[in-house]
Image (tube, helix red, strand yellow):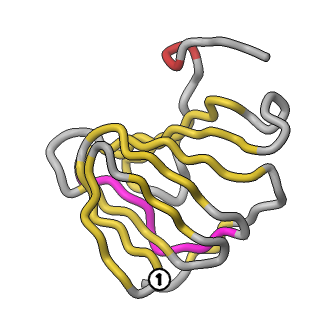
Amino acid sequence: MSVKHSQDIPSVIVAAGRHTRKQVLIPPDEGPHFAMRRFIMAPGGGMPRHTNLVEHEQYVLRGQARIGIGDEEYTVQAGDVVFIPAEVPHWYENIGDEDFEFLCIVPNKEDKTVLLPE
């Protein structure tokens, strides 16, 4: 068990993203079943269309973004909850003038990110 402040956890640049950083708040070695991550996308930032082997369960903390899940597009904002099934194509685009931040919980299973053509 551990308690820490998110400001004490370093963030890393997400190589596939634009103006996007990630913090691993609860890594797999601390949480036996799930990892908790925080993504921060600056205005104009985002993630290209891609798939993952694991599902994503997300909670939007701040900002506004357009996201694609499969063939559908959604506009999300603080307080929205997002579920992305495993292996379903998805993407993100910050459409606001502030950072878009969300928590992303994923199972501790083998994962692979595959970038897809736009």
115 lies left or right of 103: right
Find residue 112 and report its horizontal and vertical position in percent: 73, 65
| Front one among 117 and 1 | 1
Secondary structure beneath label 1:
loop
Magenta stretch bounds: 44-52
92 lies left or right of 114: left
Image height of 66 relative to 39, above or below: below
Q: The N terminus is located in which quarter?
A: top right
At a point 70% along the width and 41% down the height, the residue shown is 35
Q: Residue furthest left?
A: 97
Image height of 25 relative to 114, above or below: above
Q: Which is the main secondary structure of the residues drawn in magenta?
A: strand
Circle 1 crowding by C-alpha within 10 Å: few under 14, some 14–19, many from 20: some
Q: Is residue 78 magenta?
A: no
At a point 37% along the width and 58% down the height, the residue shown is 46
Q: The C terminus is located in which quarter?
A: bottom left
Find residue 36 and report its horizontal and vertical position in percent: 63, 39
Q: How many marks?
A: 1
Q: Which residue is mark 1?
A: 70
Find residue 19 and report its horizontal and vertical position in percent: 37, 47
Q: Disc 1 marks which amino acid?
A: Gly
Q: Choose top left, top right, bottom left or bottom right for residue 74.
A: bottom left
At a point 63% along the width and 34% down the height, the residue shown is 24
113 lies left or right of 102: right
